[in-house]
Image: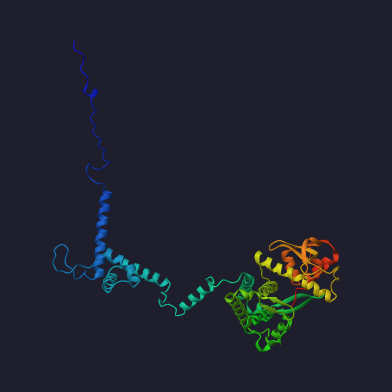
Amino acid sequence: MPSPRSAPEDEGPLPEAPLPTPDPAPGKEPGKEPETQKQKDKDKDEDKEVKQEVQQVASGTADAGKDRRTGTGAPLPEPPHKVLKSLLGAWALTACSPEETAAVEAHLTDCAGCADEALRLRDAVGLLRPANDLDLDPLLRSRVLEGCLDRRPARIPVPEWASPYDAETAKLDALLRDMGDAEWRAPVLLRWFEDERPVERTTTVAGVIGHLMAVDGLVATALGLADPLGAAAPPAPATPAARTEACWQATTDTAAPLATRVPWRDQSHTLIRTVSFAGRGAAELSVPYGGPALPLRDAFLDRAFECWVHAGDIADAVDYPYKPPTAGHLSRMVDLAARLLPGVLAGRRRAGLAAPPQRLVAAGSPGRTLHLEVEGSGGGHWYIALDSPGALGTPDHTVAHIALDSIEFCQLAAGHVSPEEAAAGQVGERDAIRDVLFATASLSRL
C-alpha cells in the first residue's frame, strides 16, 4: 500500500496571503476620497486664485489683462469680494497701490460689512505709534565716538603705582555725578589730628572737592603742569592747608557744581595721562608738601588715600553708601603709612611729643621694634623701628605688638579715630604703643 502523499504546504515557502482590504467608513463608498480632503483641496485652489487676483490687482493688470479662459483681450471683471477684503488692512495703512486703492474704495460703497471693517481698521491705525523720522541725528556719530573713547581700555597702561589714584578718583566722580544742587551744598565735617588733639572743620561738598584739587596741584606742578589755583596759589613752598585756604577764598560755595567738579576731574585725568606717558624715572620725582617731600609713586598713593577718606566724608554727609578700596590698593595705602611712621615718630620726639629713644642705633642696624599687625582686607605685618628713622625693624627686636583692622588703621591715619580707641590688641611697652598710635594719627592733615 503506497504511503500518503505530503501536502503542498509541507514543502517550500508558503504563498503570501493577500492583505485585507479595510472596510470603508460608514457612509463612504470604496475608492472615494473623504469629503474633508476634497474641501481642503478646494480651499487651496481658492487661496491660489485669491493670491493670483491680488497680484493682478497689485500689478494693475486686473482691468487690462486677458480673460484666462478665452485668451481674448476682454477686461477682467471686478476682483471678487474675498480679494478686496484681504486688501482692507493694507488700505487702512495706506500701503495699497493706486489701482488697489481705487478698487477697494469702489467696493466699500457697495459692501456694508467691508465698510464697517475698513472703519475699524482705520481707527486702529490711528492708535499705532506715529512713524519716527528716519533721518539720523547729526550728533549721533560724535556721541558714539565719545562713548567708545570713554569705555575702551587705554592704549598706554596706567602705572601700577598710580592705579589706586585712578580708581579712587573715578569712584568719587561717579558719586558726584548724581548729585543735585542741594546735595552739592550739603555741610561736610572734616576731621584730622594736630599734635595731641583732634581738630574739626565744616565745609561743603564743593569745598571738599576744591581742597582735593588744591592739594593735587602739588603733584601737577611737580610734573610741570599748570597750577589749578592759578594766580590765587600761595607762594612756594606752601603746605596743603595753605593751598586749601587759598582755594576756598578764591571760590564760593554758591558756585555751580560743575565749576569745581569738572576742573578737578580734568586735572585727575591729566595727572594719570601724564605719568602713563612718562618714563620709568618719573616714579622717583620729588613732590614737596611744604616741608617733607615724597617720591611721585608715594605722592599718588597719598592722594588716593585722601580721595577715599574725603569721599567717605561726602558720602556720610549725603547719607550714601561708599565702599572702601580693593584689598590690593588698601594694602598699599597701609604700607605707605607704616613706612612713614619712623619719620613722623622722630619729628614728634623733636617737638617733645614722644618719649626719647632708649639708645642710639646706626642707620641700617636693627633696633627696638614695634610689630604692627593689620588684619582684614589689605592687611599684613609691618615692623616699625622705634629709636631712629634709619634703624631697621626686625621681629627679633620686637618690644611691643599692636593689632588693628585695616579700615580702623586707615581711619586712625586719617584722624577719624582717636588713638586711645584704635588698637584692638596691645602687648608690650606702653610708651612704644602710645607713641606709634599718636604718630599714626599725626599722619592726618587738612
Please tell me whether residue 128 is drawn above or below residue 223 in the rendered image.
above
Q: Nearer the viewer, residue 360 or 52?
A: 360
Residue drawn at 42 percent across, 77 percent down: 136
Can you tell which quarter of the image residue 171 is in? bottom right
Residue 172, percent across and down?
Answer: 64, 73
Q: Nearer the viewer, residue 446 or 76?
A: 446
Identify the residue at the far top of this view: 1
Identify the residue at the far bottom of this view: 231
Can you tell which quarter of the image residue 260 is in? bottom right
Residue 421, percent across and down?
Answer: 80, 66
How many numbered marks have been drawn onto this rendered protein structure?
Answer: 0
**Where is the C terminus found, in terms of image quarters?**
bottom right
**Where is the N terminus found, in terms of image quarters?**
top left
Q: Nearer the viewer, residue 63 or 437?
A: 437
Residue 428, percent across and down?
Answer: 84, 61
Can you tell which quarter of the image residue 235 is in? bottom right
Please tell me whether residue 119 is drawn above or below residue 232 in the rendered image.
above
How is colour applied across the structure in the image? rainbow
Please tell me whether residue 268 is drawn above or below residue 6 in the rendered image.
below
> Is residue 182 left or right of 95 when viewed as pictured?
right
| Residue 388 seen anywhere in this rendered image of the structure | yes
| Residue 315 seen anywhere in this rendered image of the structure | no
